[in-house]
Amino acid sequence: MNNQLSAEHQQTLIETLQHRFEANPSRHAGILWNDVHVRLKAHPDKLYVLSLMEETQGEPDVVGINAQTGQFLFVDCAPESPKGRRSVCYDDAALESRKEHKPRHSAMGLAKEIGIELLTEQQYRELQQIGSFDLKTSSWIATPESVRKLGGALFCDRRYGQVFTYHNGAESYYAARGFRGALMV
């Protein structure tokens, strides 16, 4: 599998990311685009992952920085759960457990293929501090092993001006539920 983008595709993606960055300054106060750009150019493998996030309609944007490593945190900032990542159950074990009407994929499996991590509940709640997301959809989140061992998985959404965390059987899937991912660059 070729994980490299052509120079033209890289440039187009960087322009898309820059436009989104500049259009949403409240998501990354104190972070300069030039610093992000330098980091992106130095990590073409991460650009490839960002292109997959973009292709699945995640609309990735910078939402933070790790002060110790200098890495930028990119998170899916699409208003609703990314369209290209909906109708998936939680993980591959849940996918295998379905005897009929299997979804095409699992959130954890697709995240691994893309090269991202599902948001934790804390990351999801932090994302909701910089905007209103998942007003009509919901997103699977990283689920503690103790919950997963019992057959469940967690998801979140925003309703009535509040962020809610719920549980469901990990094998369930819905047209309005997908997942958001995070990537450190």
Image: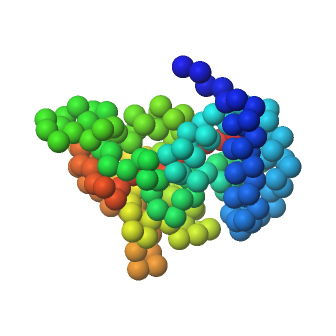
73 displayed left or right of 94: right
Q: In the rendered view, would you say 159 is above or below 14? A: below
Which residue lies most toward the bottom here? 160
Q: Residue at x 74, y 35 (%)?
A: 8
Q: Position of residue 138 (x, y in %)?
A: 38, 60
Q: Is residue 73 left or right of residue 79?
A: right
Q: Is residue 54 above or below residue 19?
A: above
Residue 125 appears in the picture as rendered: no
The residue positioned 57% from the left and 61% from the top of the image is: 127
**Spot occupied by residue 19 in the image (x, y as percentages of width and height):** 74, 57
Location of the N terminus (image quadrant): top right
Q: In the depicted view, which residue is nearer to us: 121 or 43? A: 43
Residue drawn at x 84%, y 40% is: 38
Q: Residue furthest left?
A: 99
Residue at the top extreme of this rendering: 1
Question: For the point 31% across and 55% down, which residue is it?
Answer: 175
Q: Is residue 30 visible?
A: yes
Q: Quadrant of residue 150?
A: top left
User: Relative to 46, is 23 above or below?
Assistant: below
Q: How is the image coloured?
A: rainbow
Which quadrant holds the C terminus? top right
Q: Image quadrant of residue 116?
A: top right
As drawn, the residue found furthest toward the front would be 8
Residue 59 image point, x, y percent: 58, 53
Q: How many marks?
A: 0
